[in-house]
């Protein structure tokens, strides 16, 4: 039921995947670990869709894990001098400076304190797939709160904000930078927009149980109510060809655990891994600078955001302490970078759990992976 490779030290992780697939807790999934420059775990199993086995190259929709993949693109541009984390976003994207947003700097946008966690007006799925149109709406709107003062997770629009920034700085789309500058040196493995010839590799998402959030306690002006259904992205929507072909970088990426882990290992390995040298240690260290901390105004749980990644926080108890950065996707996908132990762990499922930043299934994988590391 489980295929791939796994070093002896990480066999408990393979056992956990086998158990989860056998019980039905996972339908199909991939796991990967890069440690000290070596891909020590590259596992997959289950079904991508009924009757179709999960293969080495199965692509999974990873929701907000997409956000930290786009962070790699931003960091590469910072390394090259095309972007400055301390510069105003409006230096590169002048329209964004409207309505008092002219002092928002790049690191604040990456750290979810831009003041623009969503669209003020109702938008459709078709509109957010039209990046330039939906980005123009964000640039022209007033901030929902004073930028830089508190975290408000840019749950759907984050990729649009980063795409507007990158497009203004380079004349290229964020997807182009991700594909050509970040993923190509690793042989691919993560896509913002699945080409027609690879659509057959996409796993079908399986919707989670109902939300555990009691929306009746939240007023109509609560940021969660104003963002999550605007537009409402269900598993059914995200299983369509229209969505898969789109490049919604905040939560529309598709990838393999292996591809995600190899690229993210740039962070855990100081900017250079497997012969790919894209970042300096100084640039990598900037992701650990706290940009926002406290109860997030969208997620309603404690968060601690660095520049483009989350940092260890009480709402995600399985994430190890130390020089660690990470993030997760709706339903359970996760990537964790441990800079001191030169280790990156990635998990991508197609059966979604009730999960915003933490859940028992994902936590078990994270804890097992790092326990194996301790014992190796």
Image (cartoon, rainbow, N blue to C red):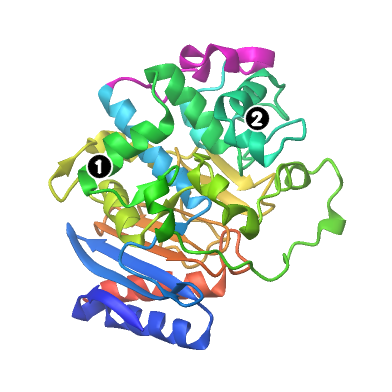
Within 10 angstroms of label 2, few (less than 14), some, or many (20 or more) residues? many
Q: Is residue 51 visible?
A: yes
As displayed, is residue 342 above or below residue 134? below
Q: Position of residue 145 (x, y in %)?
A: 72, 29
Q: Nearer the viewer, residue 208 or 326?
A: 208
Q: Position of residue 197 (x, y in %)?
A: 37, 50
Q: Position of residue 351 (x, y in %)?
A: 54, 70
Residue 184's disc is: 1
Part of the protein shown in magenta: 81-102
Question: Does the magenta segment cover residue 83?
Answer: yes
* CA gap, disc 2 and disc 1: 33 Å
Residue appearing at x 52%, y 50% in the figure: 64
Residue named by callout 2: 115
Q: Nearer the viewer, residue 269 or 290?
A: 269
Residue appearing at x 70%, y 32% in the figure: 119
Residue appearing at x 52%, y 64% in the figure: 204
Residue appearing at x 32%, y 62% in the figure: 57
Question: Does the magenta segment cover residue 279?
Answer: no
Q: Is residue 271 visible?
A: no
Outermost left residue: 275
Q: Nearer the viewer, residue 137 or 155?
A: 137
* Sequence-earlier tag: 2 or 1: 2
Q: Tell me where residue 309 sits by quadrant.
A: top left
């Amino acid at each position: 039921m489980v295929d791939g490779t796994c070093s002896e030290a990480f066999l408990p992780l393979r056992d956990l995947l086998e158990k989860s697939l056998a019980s039905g807790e996972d339908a199909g999934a991939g796991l990967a670990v890069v440690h000290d420059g070596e891909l020590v775990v590259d596992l997959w199993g289950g079904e991508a869709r009924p009757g179709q086995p999960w293969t080495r190259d199965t692509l999974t929709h990873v929701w907000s894990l997409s956000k930290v993949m786009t962070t790699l693109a931003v960091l590469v541009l910072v390394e090259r001098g095309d972007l400055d984390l301390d510069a105003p976003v409006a230096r590169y994207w002048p329209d964004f400076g409207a309505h008092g947003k002219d002092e928002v700097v790049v690191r604040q946008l990456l750290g979810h304190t831009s003041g623009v966690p969503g669209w003020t007006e109702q938008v459709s799925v078709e509109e957010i797939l039209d990046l330039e149109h939906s980005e123009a709406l964000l640039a022209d709107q007033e901030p929902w709160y004073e930028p830089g003062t508190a975290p408000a997770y840019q749950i759907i629009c984050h990729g649009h904000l980063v795409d507007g920034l990158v497009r203004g700085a380079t004349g290229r789309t964020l997807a182009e930078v991700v594909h050509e500058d970040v993923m190509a040196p690793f042989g691919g493995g993560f896509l913002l927009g699945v080409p027609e010839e690879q659509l057959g590799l996409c796993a079908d998402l399986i919707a989670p149980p109902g939300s555990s959030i009691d929306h009746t306690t939240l007023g109509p002006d609560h940021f969660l109510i104003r963002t999550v259904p605007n537009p409402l992205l269900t598993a059914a929507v995200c299983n369509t060809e229209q969505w898969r072909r789109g490049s919604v970088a905040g939560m529309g990426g598709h990838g393999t655990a292996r591809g995600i882990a190899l690229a993210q290992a740039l962070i855990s390995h100081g900017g250079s891994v497997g012969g790919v040298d894209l970042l300096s240690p100084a640039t990598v260290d900037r992701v650990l600078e706290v940009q926002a901390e406290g109860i997030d105004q969208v997620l309603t749980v404690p968060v601690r955001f660095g520049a483009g990644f989350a940092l260890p926080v009480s709402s995600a108890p399985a994430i190890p302490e130390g020089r660690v950065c990470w993030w997760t996707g709706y339903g359970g996908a996760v990537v964790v970078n441990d800079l001191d132990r030169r280790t990156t762990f990635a998990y991508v499922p197609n059966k979604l759990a009730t999960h915003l930043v933490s859940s028992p299934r994902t936590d078990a994988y994270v804890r097992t992976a790092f326990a194996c590391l301790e014992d190796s």
